[in-house]
Structure formats: structure tokens, C-alpha cells
Amino acid sequence: MADQQKTADSRFAVLGRPRHVWAVGAIHAQPDHLDAMHRAIAQGFRPGDRLVYLGNMIGHGDRVADTIDRLLDFRRALLSLRGMLATDIVYLRGAQEEMWQKLLQLHFAPDPRQVLDWMLRQGVGATLAAYGGLPESGMAAARGGTMMLGRWTRELRQAVLARPGHEALFNALRRAAYTGDADVETREGGLLLVSAGIDPARPLGQQGDAFWWGGSGFARLAEPYGVFRRLVRGFDPARQGVASGPVGLTLDGGCGFGGHLVCARLDSSGELLDLFQV
């Protein structure tokens, strides 16, 4: 993978060589499940560990704002521990977060009504409602032209700003996280964490939206991806449940669709130490 990034890239979280990595699967705006998982994590989490939320924290569920508040509360609790650093807690961008960011830029879309309709069918409506938006208002604004649509998206951005910490969390989203050093070519047997998938034919820096939309081939991964011996994702678009293969580990228990929230505790090479479901 000679084309991969050789220096630190702000799109990715470099986890270094942690004691343990706690990876939380798709939450889909289920704060009660998240509270229970946070209690389980708190019992074993220590400075030197890393906590990675694997995207799709929002969407589908109807308690989006509460979920973001719970994430921020737990972050503050962990950072109160001696030795903890802000970079020890990582939030990945999933399909739901990507759609929300694109929705806030809907006035730039060539066919905003079609884009909004597709997003609503993918579950973004719950996030829209959490910040005071209505699909009907969005469609009306899209019919009204760029200026009217720009006012609508501006109101949504202001609603996000009105919730302390929400904009900062959305701005902190990373595309992927990995153990080892910034120079991924020199790290053997590492762990790569993504939201939904990767394209094995592309180097890390050229994955683009494959991280949140490229989940179809993840379960079939049979060989390490470059220097990464273990790949972990938090969402399976096919909703096949928690699964472990020779390379890939899926932590999607169906949270938000009547199932469980899943968290794995791994060592820095990707060895699975514990699996929690709530």
C-alpha cells in the first residue's frame, strides 16, 4: 500500500499503541441503550485505553439530541480521569452523520428535492426532527429556489448551534481510526476501525465514501488490508448481526431496529478480548 498516507491526516484518528480499544457499534439514537453501555465501559475503562464510536450514532431513532448529549456527558466523565487526553475519544462518520452534513448543504445540491427524498428514506428524518426541521418545509424550500432553501438550512445549523457541544462533535468526526503510528506503512498487525466498510482495492487515503457506503464486501474479507490484520466496523447495511471473520469483525446488533447495542474491547492488534451487548 505504497500510496497510503505517510504522515498524520486529520481525516483519520491515529490511536497509537493503546492498552485497549473500546469500539461501540451503531447506536441509531437509542440513548437508553447507550447509557447501559456507558455503565459497562466505565467499569473497565482506564487511562491508556481508547474509545471509538463507529458512526451512525444518530438517525432512525427519535432521540437524536438526547443521544448526542449522552455522548458528550460520557466524554466529560472520562476526561475527568487523570491521564486521559481528548484524543483518546474518537467519533467516526457513518452514513447517518454524512447525510446530516450533506442535508445542511442541501442548497448546493443540483436536485435538492430528489436528494432530500432519498435521505428521508434512509432515516435522516429523525435527525431533521431533532433540530426542529420538517420534511414538508424542506421540500417547500427546495421548490422555492436556492435562497429559500439556504434560509431553511441556515435555521437548521442555528438549531444545532443552540445545543451545547453538538456542532463541535459533528465537526470532530473522523473517517476511520487505526492503531500504530501515523506512518501506516511501518505498522504491522494493526487494527483499523471504520463505520461500515472499505474498498480493498483502494488505499486508505482514497477510500472516500466507501467507509460509510462500501459495506457489501466487508464480510468476505479473507486477507489483511495492507498492514491491518483486523478490521472492525459498527454497521452492516445487510443487517446480518454481529459477525467475526478471518479479518473483519462486525459490531452491529441491530440497535435502532429493535436489537442490541454492541461494544468490543480489543487489544491494539485487534485481538478480541470482550464483547458486550445491551
Image (tube, grey):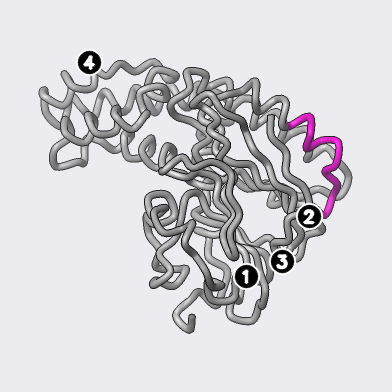
Q: Which residue is drawn at 29% across and 29% down?
A: 121
Q: Tag 3: residue type? A: Ser
Of badges 4 and 2, nearer the viewer stands 2
Residue 269's disc is 3
Main secondary structure of the magenta stretch: helix
Residue 229's disc is 1
User: Is the C-beta separation of discs 1 and 3 under 8 Å?
Assistant: yes
User: Is the C-beta separation of discs 3 and 4 under 8 Å?
Assistant: no
| Cα distance between the residues tagged 3 and 4 | 48 Å
Q: Residue 101: image x %, image y %? A: 38, 39
Q: Residue 141: image x %, image y %? A: 18, 22
Of badges 4 and 1, nearer the viewer stands 1
Q: Tag 2: residue type? A: His
| Cα distance between the residues tagged 1 and 2 | 16 Å
Q: Tag 4: residue type? A: Glu
Q: What element carries label 4?
A: helix
Q: Give the range drawn in magenta.
A: 38-48
Residue at mark 2? 20
Residue at mark 4? 136
Quadrant of the rendered image containing residue 118: top left
User: How many residues crowd mark 3 within 10 Å: few (<14), some (14–19), many (20+)?
Assistant: many
Quadrant of the rendered image containing residue 7: bottom right
Query: Looking at this rendering, what residue extends furthest in the bottom direction?
Result: 2
Is 47 in the magenta?
yes
Q: Residue at x 48, y 84 (%)?
A: 2
Q: Residue at x 11, y 23 (%)?
A: 144
| Quarter of the figure with the C terminus | top right
Q: Tag 1: residue type? A: Arg
Q: Which of 148 and 49 is in front in this view?
A: 49
**Figure label count:** 4
| Cα distance between the residues tagged 4 and 1 | 47 Å
